[in-house]
Image (spheres, rainbow, N blue to C red):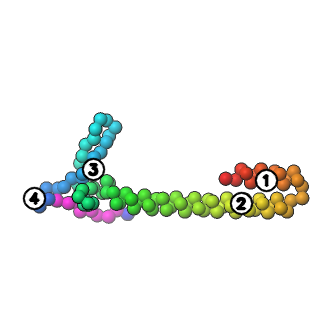
Amino acid sequence: MTTATKTLRYESGETIKCSETVYSGGFGGYNCSRNATVLRGDKYYCTIHDIVRHAEKRKERNRLWQEKWDRERAERAKCKAKLVQRIVECDDPQAAAALFDEIRRVR
């Protein structure tokens, strides 16, 4: 989903450039050559370097990862609970020890 962005211009009609400094692995950096689309504080940014947009995307990405980790954690807890139940119901001490070792392998 892309949204149309409007290039910002000076009163003279000249386009405003992004104020972000870009580093390409050499010595020093250079100003981004893209047209500015948003003003944040007193600096202009293009859609790539917009700090608020980055923060929103990072927040969404972190939320999705957290949901995945929570699902995995719940699945592991369910698996461990089943193994504990099997240990409780087990009559053979060697089988119970093997099940206990299996619990330790479930991360």
Q: Which residue is mark 4?
A: 12
Q: Nearer the viewer, mark 2 or mark 3?
A: 3
Q: Determine which of the numbered discs, if any, sits on residue 100 in the image.
A: 1
Q: Which residue is mark 2?
A: 79
CB atoms of marks 1 and 3 within 8 Å: no
CB atoms of marks 3 and 4 within 8 Å: no
Q: Give the alpha-carbon distance from disc 4 to disc 2, as whole Å.
A: 67 Å
Task: Give the image location of residue 46, x and y in percent.
Answer: 27, 55
Residue at x 68%, y 61% (from the top left corner): 77
Task: Give the image location of residue 17, x and y in percent.
Answer: 21, 53
Question: Which segment did they paint magenta?
Answer: 2-9
Q: Residue furthest top?
A: 27
Give, as a three-letter code, the residue at label 1. Answer: Phe
Mark closest to the chain's N terminus, 1 or 3: 3
- Circle 4 — which element? loop
Give, as a three-letter code, the residue at label 2. Answer: Cys
Q: Is residue 23 above or below residue 4?
A: above
